[in-house]
Image (tube, helix red, strand yellow):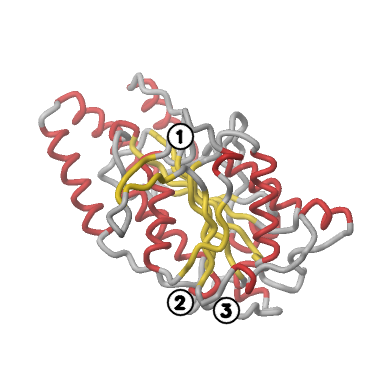
Amino acid sequence: MFTSQDYLSNEPGILEMKRTGFTAVSETHNPFRGRLLVVAFEGWNDAGEAASSAVRTLQEQLDVFPLHTVDPETYYDFQFNRPTIGFDDDGNRALTWPTSILYAPMVPADVVPSIAEDALLDVTGANAGNIYLLQGVEPSRNWLTFTNEILDVALAADISAIVLLGSMLADVPHTRPISTFVSSENAGVRHSLEVERSTYEGPVGILSVIAAAAEEADIPTLAIWASVPHYVHQGPSPKATLALIDKLEEIVDVVIPRGELVEEAATWEENINKLASEDEDMSAYIAQLEQARDMVDSPEASGESLAQEFERFLRSTDKPLDGTPENPPGP
């Protein structure tokens, strides 16, 4: 079995790398064909538990092991994120502390030194040995120290790119495909994948801090956000989780087993349909959301007609549109 020493070397810390001009990713190496770190946190960036559930699904389906665990005492407020107690596999009562864990593949794939620039999306499904995961609870404090610790481990493991998953509440209907928004602060990634740069300005979560620090360390980043219907945010949203995994699979060279997720998403939608059928106001509101979404998706829609329809939709509802896929609160 591999241990952390098989991955980690005595490389300098990230700040020392910056001072000495260390380049984490060479210009000739395509980062999305190397070792990828997929990141999600419970908390502010995780509406409907969609993002954390997506990484948890990967952790369950891929052959990975815990490479690095952060110290809960350093980063978490236990009055805000309390430890839990339960029975372990041996039947003993044990405490579980809030933390974040970086997982590595049991058998890591060799790093490809260089590839053709136009092969970025060459999906073979054979990249499972290059998928690393970071999942846990968003830290309560010491975000800069937390970020440096994670990136030091990532650099030592030769991570070449980071994919950050998030989910937000939005005015979207549960009856339509879940919208996803892909963005990057890296100009090369935007050009290669034909994605946008986020225009959001305002408060951010730990994902944005990690993204900014990673780019400074020459690790390209990509953010994928899913929109969760705000009127059903009380519980998990497996349909949004499925949308994140579908989009991730388009970018990452690995086939991701869905397990029971497809069935859970269908059941989730059916249950909401039943609730809406018993509430006229909710049904009418969902119909408004559907009309707006269908207008956006219409092939005949022009920019001007979309803007007019969008304005009509905003006037027809008292619900504010605080987090649309076009303007997510993420990196």
Amino acid of disc 2: Gly
User: In the displayed structure, does residue 27 sit left or right of residue 51?
Assistant: right
**Residue topped by disc 2:** 125
Under tag 1, what secondary structure? loop
Under tag 3, what secondary structure? loop
Question: Where in the figure is residue 122, as x and y percent of width and height?
Answer: 54, 76
The span from disc 3 to disc 1 (Cα, nearest Å) is 36 Å
Question: Where in the figure is residue 5, as x and y percent of width and height?
Answer: 64, 70
Under tag 2, what secondary structure? loop
Cβ atoms at labels 2 and 3 below 8 Å apart:
no
User: In the displayed structure, does residue 254 sit left or right of residue 284?
Assistant: right
Mark 3 Cα within 10 Å, few/some/many (few <14, many 20+)? some
User: In the displayed structure, does residue 214 sit left or right of residue 59?
Assistant: right
Query: Which residue is nearer to you in this view: 291 or 282?
Result: 282
N-term mark: 2 or 1: 1
Instruction: Judge whether 279 appears above or below 106 on screen.
Output: above
Question: Where in the figure is residue 97, as x and y percent of width and height?
Answer: 46, 43
Q: Outermost residue toward the right? A: 20
Amino acid of disc 1: Asn
Instruction: Judge whether 253 appears above or below 163 on screen.
Output: below
Query: Residue at the location (75% across, 55% down)?
Result: 217
N-term mark: 2 or 3: 3
Residue 119's tag is: none
Amino acid of disc 3: Ala
User: In the displayed structure, does residue 310 sit left or right of residue 280?
Assistant: right
The span from disc 2 to disc 1 (Cα, nearest Å) is 37 Å
Query: Which residue is nearer to you in this view: 173 or 86?
Result: 86
**Residue topped by disc 1:** 81
**Residue topped by disc 3:** 109
The span from disc 2 to disc 3 (Cα, nearest Å) is 13 Å
Mark 1 Cα within 10 Å, few/some/many (few <14, many 20+)? some
